[in-house]
Amino acid sequence: MKIPKALKKGDTIGLVGASSATPQESLPQAIEAVEKLGFNVVVGDSCHKRHGYLAGSDELRANDVNRMFRDASIDGIFSIRGGYGATKILPLLDYEMIKVNPKVFAGYSDVTALHIAFNQLCDLVTYHTPMPSTEFIKPEMDEYTWSSFLESITLTKESNYYLANPTNQEMSSLVPGKTTGQLIGGNLTLVTASLGTPYEIDTKGKILFLEDIDEYERSIDRMLTQLKLSGKLDEVAGILLGAWTNCGPQNPKRPEHSLRLQTIFEEILVPLNKPILMDVACGHCLPTMSLPLGRTIAFDTETKTIEVIE
């Protein structure tokens, strides 16, 4: 895997909208937030455009991503927000060009589709991180989240480091054990949507991270079952479970008509007999950690430690 050159103050960041349209009232705040980190900013056309719920046409959004990778003056690329639409541009991206122009690429949620493609087709390490027009401009954006983000994108290739929760949030063990493998994954909905496509996630011998938001518990059950039936869960070396924000019963007044997430995990994931660490502070939540997708990690459910290793 190619680890892109670490970012430093004074570098130029390209902002792209690969998914949903950016609310124009939040764009100046997003730009300012990135500039306050010490970076120069180039704003892609997709950050200004709207095509219904998308940040411009598929062609425009893909061209923005391709242009930012091709442009030698751009040092890193931040997805300005998630939403929906990244999967639609996958056939339009120039993977050979991207492969020879490795750069820090950051984002999460719908951006999971791009992480999977870049990890697998470009051998490029990418970064599961909060984004400029969403978390960056929230008043509750916290020091832990900023520190984790900056650590992720500014460390050198030689650096090993630990991924740790905030001090008041403990990880928990679902299935005990130790394991090592390449970290992959992201949003469960997008991971599942990759199945049966040319961009299908490869989980063999890897550590799969999963999180989601605003899904009924039965939807989580359905998607995990699909991953199980496809053989993807049987192939993993281990699983990290992040935040499941607003993922509850369809009828909160009748919770007995649903299954708790813990029950779903126990019924679908525990029988895999693979090490599983849960309550990782990552996903649609604050505080949230940033993850280097494509890097090799080792985790231990007894000590509840996750180490990014060379």
Image (tube, grey):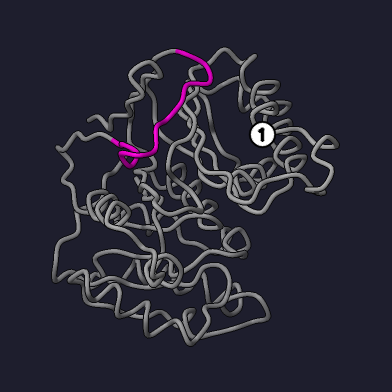
Q: Which residues are magenta?
A: 163-176
Up-down: is 53 above or below 123?
A: below
By secondary structure, the bulk of the magenta-drawn segment is best described as: loop
Measured as percent of width and height from the top left, residue 101 is found at 30, 58
Quadrant containing the N terminus is: top left
Report the residue at 29% width, 54% height from top: 149
Q: Camera-side residue: 274 or 144?
A: 144
Up-down: is 131 above or below 219?
A: below
Report the residue at 32% width, 26% height from top: 305
Does the magenta segment cover residue 171?
yes
Report the residue at 62% width, 64% height from top: 84
Which secondary structure, mark 1?
Answer: helix
Up-down: is 164 above or below 180?
A: below
Disc 1 target residue: 261
Measured as percent of width and height from the top left, residue 108 is found at 47, 55
118 left or right of 203 in image = left
194 left or right of 16 in image = right
Q: Camera-side residue: 59 or 7?
A: 7
Measured as percent of width and height from the top left, residue 219 is found at 75, 43
Measured as percent of width and height from the top left, residue 144 is found at 29, 51
Q: Give the farthest residue toward the front.
A: 253
